[in-house]
Amino acid sequence: MMCDSHTGEILSCFAFVFGYIEYRRDERCCAMSRTTTMTVRLGGALSDFVSANVGDDGSYENVSEYIRDLIRRDKERAEAEAFNRLKAELTHAFAAPEETYKPLTAAEVIARNRA
């Protein structure tokens, strides 16, 4: 697989070389296999806001569904931010002049990552 200066191809190359996409898929699969019960206390305006979004008048059937959706969306936002930071770093790195690159062997990369 060849990598060039196009961001999408850079990220595809990164995913191919380092297995990033497969790793994320495996992590998501394993994380969903366990559940945890948590208690959240809300009062006043927050409680009223949740109540307005749950039940016959709301978008969610119950509070748990609402909380899970909020957490899921926050997790997606955090992952998107991390992805965009990585994308910016890779774009910057691949835009650097070729003479700034240092050739490394696979053994050197493995040793560096173990340190």
Image (cartoon, grey):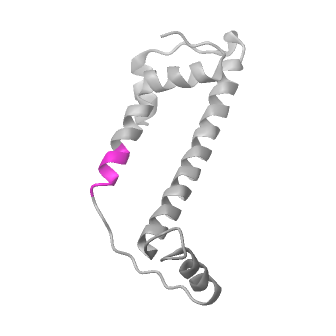
Q: Nearer the viewer, residue 51 or 67?
A: 51
Looking at the image, which residue is at 30% across and 65% down?
35
Side of 6 where 17 appears, left or right: left
| Residue 10 position within the rendered picture, expressed as x and y whole percent measured from the top left | 58, 21
Q: Nearer the viewer, residue 114 or 18?
A: 18
Rendered image quadrant of residue 37: bottom left
Q: Is residue 106 above or below residue 62?
A: above
Side of 69 where 98 appears, left or right: right
Looking at the image, which residue is at 45% across and 64% down?
68
Side of 107 where 85 appears, left or right: right
Side of 18 where 91 appears, left or right: right
| Residue 98 position within the rendered picture, expressed as x and y whole percent measured from the top left | 67, 10
| Residue 79 position within the rendered picture, expressed as x and y whole percent measured from the top left | 54, 47
* Outermost residue, left side: 33
| Residue 112 position within the rendered picture, expressed as x and y whole percent measured from the top left | 46, 30
- Specify start and end residues of the magenta stretch as a single range: 27-33
